[in-house]
């Protein structure tokens, strides 16, 4: 059984794979994940590259927002499971190495994720029956 840290890394890895598909980070994530899951063997790495390409194709053809969200959820779970299964097969030393490699890939995706920013200026505003009290400038930054 995996410890919580390793499960968290596998979960983050699954999310990063799906998040990176279709972005500038994809090429690096694709090759890194294939290398990790293929364990340095050419045949298994090619098979993983094909699975990753299928993931990207499924995301691109997902359709409307609700359909895309369902597909993303399924794919994140699929990749998380694959990563957990890999980690379960490894020795403790290998687990730590692979976990570090996965974390580096997750960090790479997060660093390249677009920053979404919203600016609201409430100067001289009046709010009635609201949770917002006072006035001023509110800046919200969401990193995805």
Image (spheres, rainbow, N blue to C red):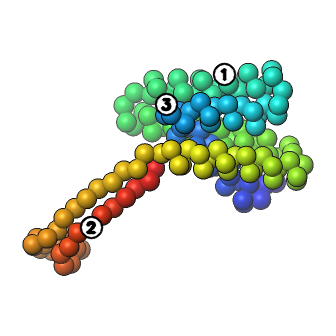
Residue 29 percent across, percent down from the top left? 62, 36
Identify the residue at image location x=46%, y=26%.
60
Left or right, residue 129 beside residue 99: left
Q: Which residue is mark 3?
A: 22
Q: CA distance from mark 3 to mark 2?
A: 32 Å
Task: Please say if 104 is above or below 39.
Answer: below
- Is residue 70 in sight in this rendering? yes
Identify the residue at image location x=25%, y=59%.
119
Q: Are marks 3 and 2 in contact (CB under 8 Å)?
A: no
Residue 53 percent across, percent down from the top left? 60, 24
Identify the residue at image location x=77%, y=42%.
85
| Image quarter of the N terminus | bottom right
Q: Earlier in the sequence, mark 1 or mark 2?
A: 1
Q: Which residue is mark 1?
A: 50
Quadrant of res 124: bottom left
Quadrant of res 14: top right
Instruction: Give the structural element (helix, strand or loop) at label 1.
Output: helix
Q: CA distance from mark 1 to mark 2?
A: 45 Å
Q: What is the tally of numbered marks visible in this picture? A: 3
| Label drawn at residue 68 | none
Q: Which residue is mark 2?
A: 138
Instruction: Give the structural element (helix, strand or loop) at label 3.
Output: loop
Would you call the spot at circle 2 few (<14 residues within 10 Å), some (14-19), or many (20 or more)? few
Identify the residue at image location x=67%, y=50%.
103
Residue 72 percent across, percent down from the top left? 51, 37
Circle nearer the viewer, 1 or 3? 3
Q: Which residue is at the far bottom? A: 134
């Amino acid at each position: 059984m995996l410890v919580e840290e390793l499960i968290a890394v596998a979960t983050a890895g699954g999310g990063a794979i799906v998040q990176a598909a279709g972005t500038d980070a994809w090429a690096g994530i694709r090759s890194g994940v294939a290398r990790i899951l293929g364990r340095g063997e050419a045949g298994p790495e090619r098979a993983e590259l094909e699975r990753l390409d299928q993931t990207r194709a499924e995301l691109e053809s997902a359709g409307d927002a609700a359909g895309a969200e369902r597909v993303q959820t399924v794919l994140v779970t699929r990749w998380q499971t694959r990563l957990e299964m890999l980690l379960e097969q490894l020795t403790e030393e290998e687990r730590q190495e692979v976990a570090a490699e996965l974390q580096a890939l997750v960090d790479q995706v997060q660093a390249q994720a677009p920053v979404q920013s919203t600016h609201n200026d409430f100067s001289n505003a009046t709010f009635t029956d609201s949770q917002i009290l006072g006035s001023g400038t509110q800046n919200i930054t969401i990193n995805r």
